[in-house]
Amino acid sequence: MLRRVAANVAVNSWKGNIFELDHKLIMARQLHARRIEGIDKNIWVDFTQLAADYKGHPPLVSILAKFFGKVVGHEINAFEEILVTVGAYQALFCTFQALVDEDDEVIIIEPFFDCYQPMVKMAGGKGVYVPLRPRVKGGKALTSADWVLSSEELASKFNPRTKAIVINTPNNPLGKVYKREELQVIADLCIKHDVVCISDEVYEWLTYDDAKHVKIASLPGMWERTVTIGSGGKSFSATGWKVGWAIGAGPIVRHLKTVHQNSVYHCATAAQEAVAQGFQREYELFGTPESYFLQLPEMLNHKRKKLATCLESVGLQPILPEGGYFMISDISSLKVDLNDPSTQGEPHDYRFVKWLIKEKGLATIPVSAFYSPEHRKDFQNYIRFCFVKEDSTLNAAEDILRKWSDGK
Ligand SMILES: Cc1ncc(COP(=O)(O)O)c(C=O)c1O
Protein backbone atom coordinates (compact mmCIF):
# COMPACT_ATOMS: atom_id res chain seq x y z
CA MET A 1 0.00 0.00 0.00
CA LEU A 2 2.79 2.35 0.78
CA ARG A 3 5.91 2.23 -1.30
CA ARG A 4 9.10 4.17 -0.97
CA VAL A 5 9.76 5.73 -4.35
CA ALA A 6 12.51 8.24 -3.91
CA ALA A 7 14.95 9.40 -1.33
CA ASN A 8 15.30 12.97 -0.10
CA VAL A 9 12.71 14.36 -2.43
CA ALA A 10 9.80 15.71 -0.49
CA VAL A 11 9.88 19.01 1.30
CA ASN A 12 6.72 20.04 3.09
CA SER A 13 5.92 23.13 5.00
CA TRP A 14 3.52 24.10 7.78
CA LYS A 15 3.08 27.72 8.75
CA GLY A 16 6.70 28.57 8.15
CA ASN A 17 8.13 25.36 9.60
CA ILE A 18 10.11 23.61 6.92
CA PHE A 19 10.70 19.95 7.48
CA GLU A 20 12.08 17.26 5.30
CA LEU A 21 11.03 13.68 4.80
CA ASP A 22 13.67 11.35 3.49
CA HIS A 23 11.10 9.58 1.43
CA LYS A 24 8.02 10.19 -0.62
CA LEU A 25 5.11 7.88 -0.38
CA ILE A 26 2.66 6.49 -2.83
CA MET A 27 -0.02 3.92 -2.30
CA ALA A 28 -0.05 0.66 -4.17
CA ARG A 29 -3.57 0.02 -2.88
CA GLN A 30 -6.09 2.07 -0.98
CA LEU A 31 -4.94 2.88 2.53
CA HIS A 32 -8.09 4.34 4.09
CA ALA A 33 -11.39 2.65 4.86
CA ARG A 34 -14.25 3.63 2.53
CA ARG A 35 -16.34 4.86 5.48
CA ILE A 36 -14.22 8.02 5.74
CA GLU A 37 -14.38 8.99 2.08
CA GLY A 38 -15.67 12.50 1.51
CA ILE A 39 -15.64 13.49 5.19
CA ASP A 40 -12.03 14.61 5.51
CA LYS A 41 -12.91 18.32 5.22
CA ASN A 42 -14.02 19.97 8.42
CA ILE A 43 -15.18 23.56 8.69
CA TRP A 44 -13.73 24.00 12.21
CA VAL A 45 -10.33 22.68 11.21
CA ASP A 46 -10.21 24.77 8.00
CA PHE A 47 -11.28 28.04 9.55
CA THR A 48 -9.37 27.73 12.82
CA GLN A 49 -6.21 27.22 10.79
CA LEU A 50 -6.84 30.49 9.01
CA ALA A 51 -7.36 32.39 12.23
CA ALA A 52 -4.43 34.54 13.34
CA ASP A 53 -4.58 33.32 16.92
CA TYR A 54 -3.72 29.76 15.83
CA LYS A 55 -0.06 30.66 15.22
CA GLY A 56 1.19 29.49 18.60
CA HIS A 57 2.40 25.89 18.74
CA PRO A 58 0.13 23.55 20.61
CA PRO A 59 2.65 22.45 23.26
CA LEU A 60 1.80 18.74 23.42
CA VAL A 61 2.24 17.81 19.74
CA SER A 62 5.38 19.95 19.60
CA ILE A 63 7.11 18.24 22.50
CA LEU A 64 5.91 14.77 21.40
CA ALA A 65 7.44 15.45 17.96
CA LYS A 66 10.69 16.63 19.50
CA PHE A 67 10.88 13.78 22.00
CA PHE A 68 9.88 10.89 19.74
CA GLY A 69 11.84 12.34 16.81
CA LYS A 70 14.94 11.65 18.91
CA VAL A 71 13.74 8.17 19.77
CA VAL A 72 12.99 7.09 16.18
CA GLY A 73 16.01 8.90 14.80
CA HIS A 74 14.38 11.34 12.39
CA GLU A 75 12.32 14.48 12.41
CA ILE A 76 8.60 14.13 13.12
CA ASN A 77 6.16 16.78 11.94
CA ALA A 78 4.17 17.87 14.98
CA PHE A 79 1.05 18.75 12.99
CA GLU A 80 0.92 16.10 10.32
CA GLU A 81 2.42 13.02 11.91
CA ILE A 82 0.88 13.09 15.40
CA LEU A 83 -2.72 12.83 16.49
CA VAL A 84 -3.54 13.50 20.16
CA THR A 85 -6.51 11.49 21.39
CA VAL A 86 -8.61 10.73 24.46
CA GLY A 87 -6.28 8.04 25.78
CA ALA A 88 -4.55 5.32 23.81
CA TYR A 89 -7.99 3.72 23.56
CA GLN A 90 -9.17 6.43 21.22
CA ALA A 91 -5.95 6.35 19.21
CA LEU A 92 -6.62 2.65 18.62
CA PHE A 93 -10.26 3.30 17.74
CA CYS A 94 -9.37 6.04 15.23
CA THR A 95 -6.72 3.80 13.68
CA PHE A 96 -9.06 0.85 13.12
CA GLN A 97 -11.93 3.03 11.87
CA ALA A 98 -9.64 4.92 9.51
CA LEU A 99 -7.73 2.02 8.01
CA VAL A 100 -9.77 -1.17 8.29
CA ASP A 101 -12.42 -1.71 5.68
CA GLU A 102 -15.23 -4.27 5.44
CA ASP A 103 -13.75 -7.78 5.17
CA ASP A 104 -10.16 -6.69 5.67
CA GLU A 105 -8.15 -9.09 7.79
CA VAL A 106 -6.20 -7.84 10.80
CA ILE A 107 -3.61 -10.11 12.40
CA ILE A 108 -3.65 -9.89 16.19
CA ILE A 109 -0.92 -11.47 18.27
CA GLU A 110 -2.17 -13.26 21.37
CA PRO A 111 -2.45 -12.68 24.25
CA PHE A 112 -3.83 -9.25 23.30
CA PHE A 113 -5.28 -6.21 25.05
CA ASP A 114 -8.94 -7.10 24.84
CA CYS A 115 -10.27 -4.04 22.94
CA TYR A 116 -8.45 -4.87 19.67
CA GLN A 117 -10.92 -7.61 18.84
CA PRO A 118 -14.18 -5.59 19.15
CA MET A 119 -12.57 -2.56 17.53
CA VAL A 120 -11.58 -4.60 14.47
CA LYS A 121 -15.09 -6.07 14.40
CA MET A 122 -16.73 -2.63 14.67
CA ALA A 123 -14.67 -1.56 11.66
CA GLY A 124 -16.07 -4.52 9.70
CA GLY A 125 -12.75 -6.35 9.72
CA LYS A 126 -11.90 -9.92 10.63
CA GLY A 127 -9.40 -10.71 13.38
CA VAL A 128 -6.84 -13.40 12.52
CA TYR A 129 -5.04 -14.68 15.61
CA VAL A 130 -1.51 -15.91 16.17
CA PRO A 131 -0.49 -16.91 19.69
CA LEU A 132 2.81 -16.39 21.44
CA ARG A 133 3.60 -19.82 22.85
CA PRO A 134 5.74 -20.69 25.87
CA ARG A 135 9.06 -22.21 24.88
CA VAL A 136 9.45 -24.63 27.73
CA LYS A 137 12.89 -24.68 29.39
CA GLY A 138 13.57 -27.55 31.81
CA GLY A 139 9.86 -28.10 32.24
CA LYS A 140 9.03 -24.45 32.95
CA ALA A 141 8.59 -21.18 31.06
CA LEU A 142 10.11 -18.74 33.49
CA THR A 143 9.95 -15.31 31.88
CA SER A 144 7.90 -13.53 29.25
CA ALA A 145 10.95 -13.77 26.93
CA ASP A 146 10.26 -17.51 26.74
CA TRP A 147 6.95 -16.80 25.01
CA VAL A 148 7.65 -16.59 21.30
CA LEU A 149 6.00 -16.45 17.89
CA SER A 150 6.50 -19.16 15.31
CA SER A 151 7.64 -17.24 12.25
CA GLU A 152 6.19 -19.95 9.97
CA GLU A 153 2.81 -19.76 11.68
CA LEU A 154 2.85 -15.96 11.52
CA ALA A 155 3.84 -15.94 7.83
CA SER A 156 1.03 -18.37 7.02
CA LYS A 157 -1.57 -15.81 8.18
CA PHE A 158 -0.59 -13.09 5.68
CA ASN A 159 -2.57 -13.00 2.46
CA PRO A 160 -3.87 -10.35 0.02
CA ARG A 161 -6.77 -9.50 2.37
CA THR A 162 -4.42 -8.69 5.27
CA LYS A 163 -4.60 -4.97 5.94
CA ALA A 164 -2.82 -4.67 9.27
CA ILE A 165 -1.10 -6.44 12.13
CA VAL A 166 -1.44 -5.37 15.77
CA ILE A 167 1.43 -5.83 18.16
CA ASN A 168 1.73 -4.72 21.79
CA THR A 169 5.17 -4.27 23.32
CA PRO A 170 5.59 -4.40 26.30
CA ASN A 171 2.60 -6.68 26.24
CA ASN A 172 -0.48 -6.64 28.42
CA PRO A 173 -1.01 -9.20 30.04
CA LEU A 174 2.23 -11.15 29.49
CA GLY A 175 4.85 -8.42 29.90
CA LYS A 176 6.78 -9.55 26.83
CA VAL A 177 9.16 -6.97 25.38
CA TYR A 178 9.84 -7.90 21.76
CA LYS A 179 13.49 -8.12 20.81
CA ARG A 180 14.76 -6.38 17.69
CA GLU A 181 15.13 -9.73 15.87
CA GLU A 182 11.52 -10.62 16.68
CA LEU A 183 10.31 -7.25 15.42
CA GLN A 184 12.40 -7.68 12.28
CA VAL A 185 10.50 -10.88 11.41
CA ILE A 186 7.21 -8.95 11.72
CA ALA A 187 8.61 -5.97 9.79
CA ASP A 188 9.83 -8.17 6.92
CA LEU A 189 6.35 -9.68 6.58
CA CYS A 190 4.68 -6.26 6.69
CA ILE A 191 6.96 -4.97 3.94
CA LYS A 192 6.63 -8.12 1.84
CA HIS A 193 2.83 -8.09 2.01
CA ASP A 194 2.36 -4.32 2.04
CA VAL A 195 0.65 -4.34 5.43
CA VAL A 196 0.27 -1.62 8.09
CA CYS A 197 1.67 -2.29 11.58
CA ILE A 198 -0.30 -0.94 14.54
CA SER A 199 2.11 -0.94 17.45
CA ASP A 200 0.61 -0.38 20.89
CA GLU A 201 3.51 0.84 23.03
CA VAL A 202 1.70 2.35 26.01
CA TYR A 203 4.08 0.67 28.48
CA GLU A 204 7.22 1.67 26.56
CA TRP A 205 9.03 3.17 29.57
CA LEU A 206 8.33 0.19 31.78
CA THR A 207 11.02 -2.38 31.09
CA TYR A 208 12.96 -4.35 33.69
CA ASP A 209 16.36 -5.97 34.04
CA ASP A 210 18.07 -5.95 30.65
CA ALA A 211 14.97 -5.74 28.44
CA LYS A 212 15.11 -2.87 25.96
CA HIS A 213 12.06 -1.42 24.27
CA VAL A 214 12.53 -1.14 20.50
CA LYS A 215 10.11 0.78 18.31
CA ILE A 216 9.17 -1.21 15.22
CA ALA A 217 8.68 2.15 13.46
CA SER A 218 12.44 2.70 13.78
CA LEU A 219 13.31 -0.39 11.71
CA PRO A 220 14.20 0.23 8.04
CA GLY A 221 11.12 0.61 5.85
CA MET A 222 8.71 0.64 8.80
CA TRP A 223 8.17 4.34 9.55
CA GLU A 224 5.97 4.73 6.50
CA ARG A 225 3.72 1.79 7.44
CA THR A 226 3.52 1.92 11.24
CA VAL A 227 1.09 3.64 13.57
CA THR A 228 2.65 3.85 17.04
CA ILE A 229 0.19 4.25 19.89
CA GLY A 230 1.21 5.88 23.18
CA SER A 231 -0.43 6.93 26.44
CA GLY A 232 0.21 9.90 28.72
CA GLY A 233 -1.66 8.09 31.48
CA LYS A 234 0.66 5.08 31.30
CA SER A 235 3.81 7.19 30.78
CA PHE A 236 3.18 9.32 33.88
CA SER A 237 1.15 6.86 36.00
CA ALA A 238 -1.97 9.00 35.74
CA THR A 239 -4.41 6.80 33.86
CA GLY A 240 -7.39 9.04 34.59
CA TRP A 241 -5.93 11.83 32.46
CA LYS A 242 -6.86 9.98 29.27
CA VAL A 243 -4.36 11.57 26.93
CA GLY A 244 -3.02 9.34 24.18
CA TRP A 245 -1.54 9.69 20.74
CA ALA A 246 -0.92 8.01 17.42
CA ILE A 247 2.33 8.76 15.64
CA GLY A 248 3.08 7.79 12.05
CA ALA A 249 3.71 9.01 8.54
CA GLY A 250 1.49 11.90 7.40
CA PRO A 251 -0.37 9.92 4.69
CA ILE A 252 -1.59 7.48 7.38
CA VAL A 253 -2.21 9.90 10.24
CA ARG A 254 -4.31 12.17 8.06
CA HIS A 255 -6.95 9.41 7.83
CA LEU A 256 -6.94 8.95 11.61
CA LYS A 257 -7.54 12.69 11.91
CA THR A 258 -10.62 12.39 9.73
CA VAL A 259 -12.16 9.96 12.22
CA HIS A 260 -11.03 12.04 15.19
CA GLN A 261 -12.35 15.36 13.91
CA ASN A 262 -15.72 13.75 13.19
CA SER A 263 -16.03 12.09 16.58
CA VAL A 264 -14.52 13.95 19.57
CA TYR A 265 -12.63 16.68 17.67
CA HIS A 266 -10.63 17.88 20.68
CA CYS A 267 -9.12 16.54 23.91
CA ALA A 268 -9.16 18.27 27.29
CA THR A 269 -6.62 21.12 27.19
CA ALA A 270 -5.63 20.93 30.86
CA ALA A 271 -4.72 17.24 30.60
CA GLN A 272 -2.81 17.87 27.35
CA GLU A 273 -0.88 20.68 29.02
CA ALA A 274 0.01 18.46 31.99
CA VAL A 275 1.33 15.71 29.70
CA ALA A 276 3.21 18.31 27.62
CA GLN A 277 4.95 19.61 30.74
CA GLY A 278 5.81 16.06 31.76
CA PHE A 279 7.43 15.39 28.40
CA GLN A 280 9.23 18.74 28.42
CA ARG A 281 10.78 17.80 31.77
CA GLU A 282 11.69 14.33 30.50
CA TYR A 283 13.24 15.83 27.38
CA GLU A 284 15.56 17.89 29.56
CA LEU A 285 16.34 15.07 32.01
CA PHE A 286 16.39 12.09 29.65
CA GLY A 287 19.14 9.63 30.54
CA THR A 288 19.84 11.26 33.91
CA PRO A 289 18.93 9.74 37.30
CA GLU A 290 16.20 12.38 37.75
CA SER A 291 14.29 11.16 34.69
CA TYR A 292 10.87 9.81 35.67
CA PHE A 293 11.12 7.32 32.80
CA LEU A 294 14.15 5.87 34.60
CA GLN A 295 12.80 6.16 38.12
CA LEU A 296 9.40 4.59 37.39
CA PRO A 297 10.64 1.14 36.28
CA GLU A 298 13.11 1.11 39.18
CA MET A 299 10.25 1.77 41.59
CA LEU A 300 8.01 -0.87 40.01
CA ASN A 301 10.78 -3.44 39.74
CA HIS A 302 10.75 -3.77 43.50
CA LYS A 303 6.99 -4.48 43.43
CA ARG A 304 7.45 -6.93 40.54
CA LYS A 305 10.06 -8.89 42.47
CA LYS A 306 8.00 -8.84 45.66
CA LEU A 307 4.96 -10.30 43.90
CA ALA A 308 7.02 -12.91 42.04
CA THR A 309 8.67 -14.14 45.25
CA CYS A 310 5.34 -14.33 46.99
CA LEU A 311 3.64 -16.24 44.14
CA GLU A 312 6.54 -18.64 43.89
CA SER A 313 6.48 -19.36 47.61
CA VAL A 314 2.84 -20.49 47.46
CA GLY A 315 3.22 -22.61 44.32
CA LEU A 316 1.72 -20.14 41.85
CA GLN A 317 4.43 -20.29 39.17
CA PRO A 318 5.01 -16.68 38.01
CA ILE A 319 6.09 -15.87 34.44
CA LEU A 320 8.43 -12.98 35.19
CA PRO A 321 7.45 -10.04 32.95
CA GLU A 322 10.15 -8.06 31.11
CA GLY A 323 7.88 -5.01 31.03
CA GLY A 324 4.51 -3.46 31.86
CA TYR A 325 2.22 -3.56 34.89
CA PHE A 326 1.22 -7.21 34.96
CA MET A 327 2.46 -10.67 35.82
CA ILE A 328 0.83 -13.90 34.75
CA SER A 329 1.04 -17.00 36.80
CA ASP A 330 0.67 -20.70 35.94
CA ILE A 331 -2.08 -22.34 38.01
CA SER A 332 -1.91 -25.79 36.43
CA SER A 333 -0.22 -27.45 39.42
CA LEU A 334 -2.73 -26.08 41.97
CA LYS A 335 -5.34 -28.53 43.12
CA VAL A 336 -8.45 -26.69 44.24
CA ASP A 337 -12.01 -27.84 44.31
CA LEU A 338 -13.75 -25.96 41.49
CA ASN A 339 -17.11 -27.63 41.83
CA ASP A 340 -19.22 -24.48 41.96
CA PRO A 341 -22.15 -25.39 39.68
CA SER A 342 -22.71 -21.74 38.77
CA THR A 343 -19.37 -21.69 36.90
CA GLN A 344 -19.71 -25.09 35.24
CA GLY A 345 -18.77 -25.08 31.55
CA GLU A 346 -16.58 -21.98 31.91
CA PRO A 347 -12.84 -22.07 31.11
CA HIS A 348 -10.66 -23.37 33.96
CA ASP A 349 -9.02 -19.97 34.63
CA TYR A 350 -12.44 -18.23 34.80
CA ARG A 351 -13.59 -20.76 37.38
CA PHE A 352 -10.34 -20.44 39.29
CA VAL A 353 -10.50 -16.62 39.38
CA LYS A 354 -14.11 -16.69 40.60
CA TRP A 355 -13.15 -19.23 43.27
CA LEU A 356 -10.16 -17.06 44.33
CA ILE A 357 -12.39 -14.00 44.71
CA LYS A 358 -15.13 -15.85 46.56
CA GLU A 359 -13.05 -18.07 48.81
CA LYS A 360 -9.92 -15.98 49.36
CA GLY A 361 -10.94 -12.39 48.56
CA LEU A 362 -8.21 -11.95 45.96
CA ALA A 363 -9.04 -10.38 42.58
CA THR A 364 -7.12 -11.46 39.45
CA ILE A 365 -8.02 -11.77 35.75
CA PRO A 366 -8.26 -15.01 33.74
CA VAL A 367 -5.65 -14.94 30.96
CA SER A 368 -7.75 -16.88 28.44
CA ALA A 369 -9.83 -13.66 28.20
CA PHE A 370 -6.88 -12.25 26.22
CA TYR A 371 -7.21 -14.96 23.54
CA SER A 372 -9.54 -15.53 20.63
CA PRO A 373 -12.28 -18.16 21.08
CA GLU A 374 -10.31 -20.57 18.84
CA HIS A 375 -7.20 -20.48 21.06
CA ARG A 376 -8.79 -19.86 24.44
CA LYS A 377 -8.90 -23.51 25.44
CA ASP A 378 -5.10 -23.83 25.02
CA PHE A 379 -4.40 -21.04 27.53
CA GLN A 380 -6.71 -21.77 30.47
CA ASN A 381 -3.99 -22.30 33.03
CA TYR A 382 -2.88 -18.75 33.69
CA ILE A 383 -4.16 -15.84 35.73
CA ARG A 384 -3.03 -12.20 35.62
CA PHE A 385 -1.91 -10.18 38.63
CA CYS A 386 -1.28 -6.44 38.64
CA PHE A 387 1.76 -5.40 40.68
CA VAL A 388 1.29 -1.64 40.25
CA LYS A 389 -0.33 -1.32 43.65
CA GLU A 390 0.43 0.37 46.94
CA ASP A 391 2.80 -1.74 49.04
CA SER A 392 0.01 -2.10 51.61
CA THR A 393 -2.22 -3.73 48.95
CA LEU A 394 0.60 -6.05 47.88
CA ASN A 395 1.21 -6.95 51.54
CA ALA A 396 -2.49 -7.73 52.01
CA ALA A 397 -2.40 -9.99 48.91
CA GLU A 398 0.70 -11.68 50.28
CA ASP A 399 -1.08 -12.32 53.61
CA ILE A 400 -4.01 -13.94 51.83
CA LEU A 401 -1.72 -16.16 49.75
CA ARG A 402 0.38 -17.19 52.76
CA LYS A 403 -2.64 -18.10 54.85
CA TRP A 404 -3.95 -20.15 51.97
CA SER A 405 -0.59 -21.85 51.48
CA ASP A 406 -0.24 -22.61 55.22
CA GLY A 407 -3.73 -24.08 55.32
CA LYS A 408 -3.19 -26.31 52.31
C1 LIG B 1 -2.05 -2.39 26.06
C2 LIG B 1 -2.92 -1.22 26.34
N1 LIG B 1 -3.20 -0.36 25.34
C3 LIG B 1 -3.97 0.72 25.54
C4 LIG B 1 -4.50 1.00 26.78
C5 LIG B 1 -5.37 2.23 26.96
O1 LIG B 1 -4.63 3.28 27.50
P1 LIG B 1 -5.32 4.71 27.88
O2 LIG B 1 -5.61 4.65 29.33
O3 LIG B 1 -4.28 5.75 27.55
O4 LIG B 1 -6.54 4.83 27.04
C6 LIG B 1 -4.25 0.13 27.85
C7 LIG B 1 -4.87 0.39 29.17
O5 LIG B 1 -4.95 -0.44 30.03
C8 LIG B 1 -3.43 -1.00 27.63
O6 LIG B 1 -3.15 -1.87 28.61
Image (spheres, helix red, strand yellow):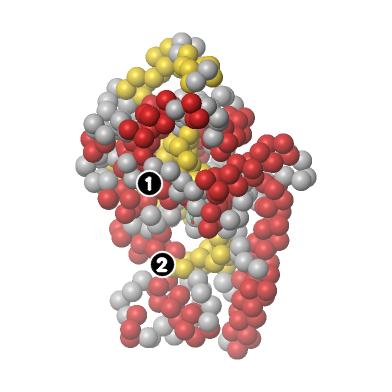
Is residue 210 left or right of 30 when viewed as pictured? right
- Residue farthest toward the bottom in the current orientation of the protein: 407
Q: Label 1 sits on what residue type?
A: Val
User: Looking at the figure, which quarter contains the C terminus?
Assistant: bottom right
Label 1 CA crowd tier, 10 Å (few <14, some 14–19, many 20+): few
Report helix, strand or loop for mark 1. Answer: loop
- Badge 2 is on which residue? 380
- Rendered residue at 29%/40% (across/down): 100
Residue 312 image point, x, y percent = 63, 70
Q: Residues within 10 Å of mark 2 (few under 14, many from 20)?
A: many
**Residue 277 percent across, percent down from the top left:** 64, 43
Look at the picture and state if 253 lies above or below 274.
above
Instruction: Locate residue 342: give its quadrant.
Output: bottom left
Nearer to us: label 1 or label 2 = 1
Q: Which mark is residue 264?
A: 1
Near-viewer residue (297 or 348): 297
Identify the residue at horizontal 69%, vertical 48% (top origin): 292
- Mark 2 and mark 1 in contact (Cβ < 8 Å)? no
Location of residue 392 by image quarter? bottom right
Residue 299: quarter of image: bottom right
Q: Name which residue type carries label 2.
A: Gln
Residue 152 seen in the current view: no
Q: Earlier in the sequence, mark 1 or mark 2?
A: 1
Location of residue 261 with respect to 350 vertically, above or below: above
Residue 261 image offset from top left, x and y in percent: 36, 39
Q: Residue furthest front?
A: 52
Q: Identify the mark at residue 312; answer none if there is no mark.
A: none
The image quadrant where one finds the N terminus is: top left
Compared with 279, 41 (above or below) is above
Nearer the observer, 188 or 387: 387
Residue 226 lies, in percent from the top left, at 44, 33
